[in-house]
Amino acid sequence: MPLLATPILLCLHLLAATLWVGGMATFHVAVRPAAVDTLEPPQRLRMLCGALGRFFRWVTAAIVLLLATGFAMVQLAGGMGALRWHVHAMLGIGAAMMVIFAVIRLRHHPLMAEKVAAGDWKAAAAALARIRQLVFINLWLGVAVFVIAVVGRAL
């Protein structure tokens, strides 16, 4: 089992990262634009608020899995001092992504949900716009982590 520990941890780590980054990409480039094209603002905002809430529960679980598997792999590798620069870069960018996600999840999404429930479509749309901006930033940070993970090993 010790020989399989790192590959299993890495597989779980990559699955969690893919869920998070792939979900952001799907939401940003497909789900929201389709909702804009097909739904009126009240229905669109209700649907997107609900979909984001579901997605954010999955992202929260993915973050827990990323942290658990990431730090387990660090320990198996001999600790932080034994790691190359690209792992430190991935951890730093990942930490920034988690902070941004926390702001979205704990501040902007609850505000959006509150405004949707109250039928304040203008304020709900403004909250969604802020969520979109932060998701866009996180999406590109996530892409950077994938690039660093692959290219960093070769440098």
Image (tube, rainbow, N blue to C red):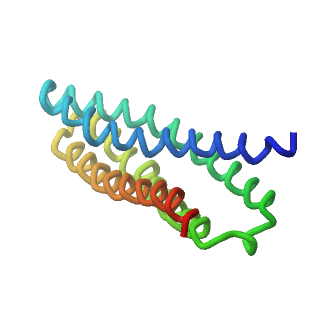
Q: Residue at 60% of width from left, 73% of height from top?
A: 85
Name the quarter where the C terminus is drawn: bottom right
Which picture quadrant has residue 51? top left
Position in image of residue 7 (x %, y %): 71, 44
Task: Please state which of residues 115 and 27 is positioned toward the viewer in this rendering.
Answer: 27
Task: Please state which of residues 111 and 44 is positioned toward the viewer in this rendering.
Answer: 44
Position in image of residue 81 (x %, y %): 74, 75
Position in image of residue 75 (x %, y %): 79, 60
Name the quarter where the N terminus is drawn: top right
* Identity of the residue furthest to the right in this view: 1
Which picture quadrant has residue 115? top left
Q: Is residue 106 above or below residue 15?
A: below
Task: Please state which of residues 19 and 1 is positioned toward the viewer in this rendering.
Answer: 1
- Left or right for 92, reference 126: right
Q: Is residue 136 above or below residue 46?
A: below
Position in image of residue 108 (x %, y %): 36, 51
Task: Please state which of residues 21 and 60 is positioned toward the viewer in this rendering.
Answer: 21
